Image: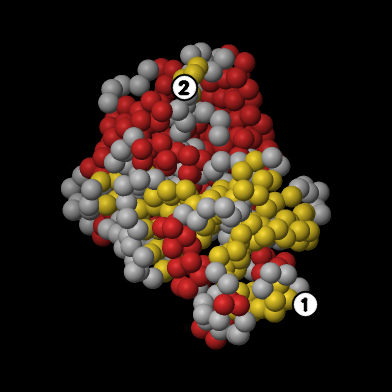
Amino acid sequence: MTLPLEDFLTGARWFGGKGRPLAVTGVRRLGLLGDERRGTGSPALALDLVTVDYSDAEGGTEYYQLPLSCYSEPQASLEHAAVGSTEDPDLGFVHVYDAVHDRQAMAHLLEAFDRQPTGGPLRFERLPGHDLDLGTHSTLFSGEQSNSSVAFGEDSLLKVFRKITPGRNPDITVHEVLTRAGSDHVAALFGWLESDSLLEGEVLQLAMLQQFLRTASDGWELALSSVRNLFAEADLHANEVGGDFAGEARRLGVALRETHETLAQHFPTRTRSTDEQAAVAAAMNARLDAAAAIVPQLVERVPAVRRVFDAAAGLTDVAVQQIHADLHLGQTLRTVKGWKIVDFEGEPAKPLAERQLPDTPWRDVAGMLRSFDYAPRVVERTYDDSDPSATEQRAYRSAEWSKRNRTAFLAAYAGRDLTPQENLLLAAYVADKAVYETVYEARNRPTWVSIPLDAISRVRPS
């Protein structure tokens, strides 16, 4: 009897290949913690790596990590997380469950981080300075899309990477550098888990353990609340309402600037060659052409956007460094001690080698500016649009909120007026991000495509 892994994968929220024809072509055991045969009643925790091959025109191979709780008897409390039953080569006949739902299995992992066992196929790396609280129990976060996160009480947070790319994960490497540097703008890294079982000649990094930000509020949700507060105060401007967000936008701008400064001190920096800058602009133009073929409303806007990209192609002395590379309000948390930036993994859909390349910090800035433009437009869509005058007023107030917070954020980040080159570079990255958004919205939320299209209409080459 084999586990129905294809059914399990395609039903998992974090699986990235939904809707594509696929086959599970391999399962590799990376490690085993605990042992059900000891008669303790606690599960064995198997960490398996599944190979998925796609048979559509795009093709390709992906790897997914499955942490599995293995019991000799069925567990009614875990039925919602059941994977199936099988004759396991290491454990005999077992009933198998998705381990992130199982507090006993997660306790195995936390204890292993504390003990740091040696000699096995798994390496539990730790940074000094924090004693783990082993008396806590785990709680699975339900909202994540591409990974699985488990909180241990109010002490630590374990992020289990689901899609595994051979090589060192930027989420770990960047957090390690920022933690060792004493940055106030990230959750401190406590440790990480990797496997000795190399794939494609590269290490496999499986999970990271970090500080749990107990008082944190999601930056995106805070922005939405601010917009709702503005809409509720029909006679007041954005700077007059109690929920004005501009102060937070300024603090977030400072946090990003200081994070970029720290990264520049600890990672390599350099200047793009003229050929590299031309290639970046060419890639933007290629994405623009591909998007116009998918989103017909974009076609009439192509010439103006192309002028921006073509102008950016000739820029010189563009400094690049380690950045976040997928920054928006949803990647920020507000705590009592200030803003924290999370998820330095980069865009998960991109190859690891591409995610590890240095880029200009203005790309991160552009991502935040687009997020400030999105927030009020999203709230607008929750209101009844049957009253044209009310709809027009909300549109005006949306634009006011967006401009006020984009201006506050950018002024705090730069601390000065931008140079003409910086303005052009930032405009190119904002336009490139909005072009990406048109494709995403056309495919997933067609009624929202006007949000990035309106932003593209405001693009100017100078």
Name the kind of residue labelled 2 in the image. Thr
Secondary structure under tag 2 reads loop
- How many other residues sit within 10 Å of disc 1, few (<14), some (14-19) or many (≥20)? few
Inter-mark Cα distance, 2 to 1: 53 Å
Q: Which of these two is toward me, 149 or 111? A: 111
Instruction: Tell me what residue is drawn at x 45 percent, y 28 percent.
Output: 267
Question: Where, by quadrant of the figure, is residue 403 drawn?
Answer: top left
Label whose residue precedes the other's in the sequence (2 or 1)? 1
Q: Are marks 2 and 1 in contact (CB under 8 Å)?
A: no
Q: Which of these two is toward me, 440 or 240? A: 440
Residue 64: x and y in percent read 64, 56
- How many other residues sit within 10 Å of disc 2, few (<14), some (14-19) or many (≥20)? some
Q: Which of these two is toward me, 455 or 3? A: 3
Q: Which residue is mark 1?
A: 1
Secondary structure under tag 1 reads loop
Is 352 displayed left or right of 459 in the figure?
right
Q: Which residue is mark 2?
A: 269
